Image (cartoon, rainbow, N blue to C red):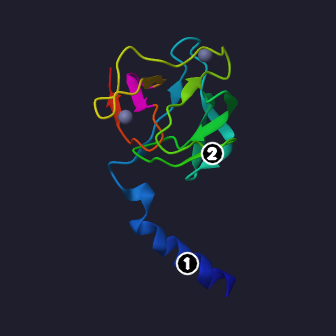
Amino acid sequence: MQEVLEETRKGGDNGGVSTDQRIFPVKVNCPRCNHSLLDHAHNIDDHPSIRVTMSFQHKHGWLRLSSLYGVHGHESEYSIPESAITHFFCPHCHTELNGVSSCPECEAPVVPMIVRSGGMVQICSRRGCHWHRLDVG
Ligand SMILES: [Zn+2]
Ligand SMILES: [Zn+2]
């Protein structure tokens, strides 16, 4: 019985997230101290999560993002109100991860992270805005 269930689950994975060519994991580092931002002890969507410190409205806490590019799953210590702008900080050097540009869709600041294989990923800091961009350098 156990084996049959295993088989069924594997078969069901074929149409899932991991086979979508547009969705792939990115390994990101802090642009300032170059430490990894991946938390291998805590997965989201079966991949190591991206862990940063966030602050909004005088609250400070941890925030974990899916490291799958294009997936917007996240977990956080405090639930972020819809459309609130969140500040992201590196958990290692505590530098705010802020870029020079603003989101083309909602004008909130964008959050840059270094992609280990080269390039940079940027995400919008506003909760609920799904703008993101990957520049391969
Ligand atoms: Zn850092
Ligand atoms: Zn935005």
Q: Residues within 10 Å of mark 2 (few under 14, many from 20)?
A: few
| Residue 47, image x, y percentages | 57, 47
Q: In the depicted view, which residue is nearer to us: 42 or 7? A: 42
| Left-right relation of 56 to 18 | right
**Main secondary structure found in the magenta portion:** strand
Residue 85 painted magenta: no
At label 1, which amino acid type do we have? Glu
Q: Which mark is residue 126?
A: none
Q: Residue furthest left?
A: 104
Which of discs 1 and 2 lies nearer the camera? The answer is: 2
Ligand 1 image-quadrant field: top right
| Left-right relation of 116 to 70 | right
Q: Is residue 41 above or below residue 87?
A: below
SS state under label 1: helix
User: What residue did someone put label 1 on?
Assistant: 7
Do tag 1 and tag 2 residues touch (Cβ < 8 Å)?
no
For the point 51% across and 15% down, the residue is 31
Q: Is residue 42 above or below residue 51?
A: below
SS state under label 2: loop
Quarter location, residue 30: top right
Q: Which mark is residue 79?
A: 2
Picture quarter with the C terminus? top left
| Residue 75, image x, y percentages | 62, 46
For the point 60% across and 84% down, the residue is 4
Q: Of callouts 1 and 2, which one flags the residue occurring earlier in the amino acid sequence?
A: 1
| Residue 59, image x, y percentages | 68, 31
Q: Which residues are magenta?
A: 117-124
